[in-house]
Image (cartoon, helix red, strand yellow):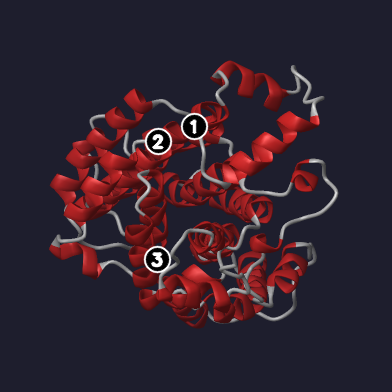
Amino acid sequence: MARWRVRRRMTQQMLADRLGKSKSWVDKVERGVRALDRYSVIQEIAEVLRVDPAVLLGTRLPSVGGTGGLDGVDELRAALARYDVPAGVVSPVELRRHVGHAWLTYQHAHYAQVLRALPGLLDAARSRHATAPEGAAEALVQTYRITSAVLVKLGEADLGWLAADRAVAVAGDDPALAGTAAVAVGQALRALGRGRLALAVTVAAARRVAPRPVRDATAVRQALCGTLLLQAALAAAEHGDAHQTDELIDLTAGIATRVGSGDDPHRTCFGPVVVELARVVAAIEVGDGGEAVYRHEQVIRREGWRLLPAEYRAAYLVDAARAYLQVGDLFGAGRVLVDADGIAPAEVRCRPVARTVIAELARGRPSGAGVARLATLVGLTTR
């Protein structure tokens, strides 16, 4: 039940409200303190979580959770499982070029291409780090970060956590490098529903990156610190702590005002607009769909919105669709989802969370033409 609640991006309080139960009841069930021994209750939970009761009983998996037919995850898993150091060493210049290209490909949401490139890039980065470690740690950390990011996107959060953890190990005692790795750890832990762990990890990393007072650090260090604190804020939101969420986002807003949207060597996209997007996502996580919709319609009018990478904008719009669903606006949810598909099709057609939103919209009456088209493309039905 806990796993599916997290996959549906619901807090314990949200699930409790929809079931007419207390948050304590949900928490006890998820911790195994209270047994689910009545099939009628299991059916009710399954309806709220939008899964077949058999899924909760562990007898089969649903079809909407796939990766839209993308190949390459198994090859990437195999690359992560290789512990021998591959032969051959690429030059530092060539390795940096390949890593930079992988980042750009990811930011354009060309996930199939990223999946094809990553096994070889992992081998090259590991080989360089093992045989000529001077200056090679950054390339390997960034490669693990890309690996973690795309795996989390495609619903393979356990593998994403593994890749992020390896990035932390490679980063060692370098605060900035360890901070970039911790961003990936926070994202993976959040995807696994481990919000409290994600909060602890990212706050600790932020303190190492930019010890107080934060304003005395370089702009690049401040931006990385802000990125980590945004991850912490979203983690706090996911376990229902609205007060801590607001405090953390307000803190990052101050950092963003100072540093603006300048150089981005760590590929964080941090800046004032990203902070406001995080406010929207945080409102969704705590169940305040009305506040999320209001803020969303303001922030996408800002100039910095269109300067963000396609992947970032499309991923955010998938979240925004959830906000419209929370307030019962199926037309609004469909509109932003179609907009997301226009920006980065793979973000909508391959991610399990987006496919879940499409499935919920497709069940609505009437289903718009754009939503019906997306449902067909991802193999769902509007009937």
Mark sitting earlier along the chain (1/3): 1
From this view, report whether residue 352 is shown above or below residue 254. Answer: below
Percent x, y of residue 136: 53, 66
**Does residue 75 appear left or right of residue 243 in this picture?**
right
Taking the spot 41% from the left edge, 71% from the top edge, the residue there is: 107
- Asked whether the beta carbons under mark 2 and mark 1 sit within 8 Å of each other, the answer is yes
- Which residue corresponds to mark 3? 337
Residue 113, given in percent of the width and then of the height, sits at 56, 81
Residue 213, picture quadrant? top left
Q: Is residue 169 above or below residue 119?
A: above
Which residue is located at x 72 percent, y 37 percent? 43
Picture coordinates of residue 275, whole percent (x, y): 26, 47
Instruction: Identify which amino acid the numbered label 2 is placed on.
Output: Gly
Label 2 CA crowd tier, 10 Å (few <14, some 14–19, many 20+): many
Q: Which amino acid type corresponds to the residue marked 1 in the rendered image?
A: Met
Q: How far apart are marks 2 and 3 (CA)?
A: 19 Å
Disc 1 packing (10 Å; few <14; some 14–19; many ≥20): many
The residue at which mark 2 appears reads as: 287
Which is more N-terminal, label 3 or label 2?
Answer: 2
Q: Quadrant of the N terminus?
A: top right
First in sequence: mark 2 vs mark 1: 1
Q: What element carries label 2?
A: loop
Quarter of the rendering containing residue 297:
bottom left
- Dot 3: few (<14), some (14–19), or many (≥20) neighbours within 10 Å? many
* Mark linked to residue 177: none
Residue indicated by mark 1: 14
Question: 138 or 147: nearer the eye?
Answer: 147
Picture mark count: 3
